[in-house]
Image (cartoon, helix red, strand yellow):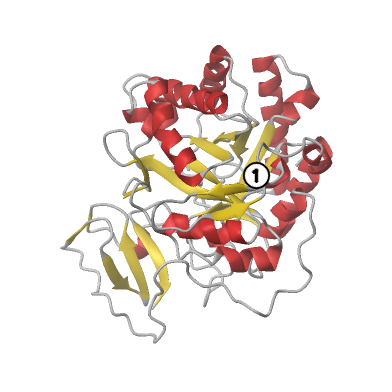
Amino acid sequence: MERARLTPPAPGRPRPRARARARGPVAALLGLGLLAGGLTALALGDSASAATTAALGSNWYASAPYLMPEDNNPPDAAAVMDATGQKAFQLAFILDGGSCQPAWGGTSAISTDTTMPAVIQTIRAKGGDVSVSFGGYGGTKLGQTCGTPEATAAAYQKAVDKYQLKAVDFDLEEPEYENTAAIHNEIGAARLLQQNNPGLYVSITTAGTTSGTGWFGQQMLNEAKSQGFTPNNYSIMPFDGGFASGAAQTDALVKFNSLLQSTFGWSEATAYAHEGVSMMNGRTDSAEYFRQADFQTVLDFATAHGLARYTFWSVNRDRQCTGAVDPGLSGSCSSVAQGDWDFTKYTVRFAGATPPSTPPTSSSPTSTISATPSSGTCTAAAWDSTKVYTAGNTVSYAGHRWHAKWWTLNENPSASGQWGVWADDGPC
């Protein structure tokens, strides 16, 4: 994710970019009732059998942590559900696959993808559900290419229909949210989806700063006001660039509340009821460290003030790294000492539930996509700095298997970072 700036860039100056992630009012949200639904037949594409699930309460969509089932050594969602009690996940991310067509990660068209329907079916078969996040850090967003709010909404509607979604998230940050036309399209699309899909839960996630949000975040809020659009919540990401603790994060939430009040004319309580937080567990892109105690600090604040959402990036990272506890930034582990799924349990508590006291013994987390070799021998060819790689190409490097997300040349996999071209599929 990208971090917002407090002021617009000066004409002619390059735009510095500080990275941040691509993420209930317990009693209050529980009192809001269930989203429209009931037992619904969920057609997940021609290749997936139908599943049925009862609509979840909005408290679960408000607590759904981000999960990437196609990148960063994805865990088995069913095992995470068993171990934590979490019922919902925020699947990330849908981007433009070309010609205003939705695609997972910008490369896997939703019309042909088979991984996501299988993951969704597994979650729903256990009584859970998913939300889908549009945007995130990197790649080309549909709001940048579709031309109008109507065309953008039509592209997103394909995902709503295919996966029978009851909840969606618009993750609006750099570089897209510096594009006025693109943000007009995204906010317009969110408004149209809300209008055309009664009961749809819609969250807006944007960059956070120590002042709440920056100049472009405020511009996004102004756009929403001009269109008369009110989502279920506006959530900020208070990490990267000046956040050293949970206390610093809650201070940013207080300041963001003031921005919501001044922009929309809300009272403090109304603003908190439309405000959310999306954190990053463990080590962040700027080498901040948020541990379990920090998540507890923010959880206490969220429940005390009736925040509308409490989530984090990401479930893929919600486990301790093997070997050195902190090997550096990773997309598949947290770089802090922890038990598996410690951070997910905080979102469960926000939803008003109690996580299991002991982990289940019947299953253990495994990848939801093709497994990496377990023999300790890398079967993929070694990474070659002189070779061009394209999306889907696999290599071995430093005892891990990696796959390219897009075209690359001479980018070292281990130096790529969570948001780089290489996704770490785990040890060979």
Q: How many marks?
A: 1
Disc 1 crowd rating (10 Å Cα; few below 14, some 14-19, many 20+) is: many
Instruction: Establish if 346 lies above or below 34.
Output: below
Is residue 101 rendered to the left or right of residue 374? left
Q: What residue does disc 1 label? A: 61
Is residue 42 rendered to the left or right of residue 201? left
Residue at 53% x, 23% y: name it. Answer: 191
In this rendering, does residue 209 appear at all? no
Is residue 374 rendered to the left or right of residue 12? right
Which quadrant holds residue 363? bottom right
Residue at 61% x, 29% y: name it. Answer: 198
In this rendering, does residue 157 appear at all? yes
Instruction: Establish if 292 lies above or below 159.
Output: below
Is residue 293 rendered to the left or right of residue 184? right
Under mark 1, the amino acid is Tyr
Instruction: Establish if 305 lies above or below 343.
Output: above
Looking at this view, is 295 or 53 the one in front? Answer: 53
Which quadrant holds residue 282? bottom right
Residue at 54% x, 70% y: name it. Answer: 321
Residue at 28% x, 67% y: name it. Answer: 394
| Percent of width and height locating residue 354 | 80, 59
| Percent of width and height locating residue 161 | 47, 39
Secondary structure type for disc 1? helix
| Percent of width and height locating residue 112 | 33, 51
Quadrant containing the C terminus is bottom left
Which quadrant holds residue 58? top right
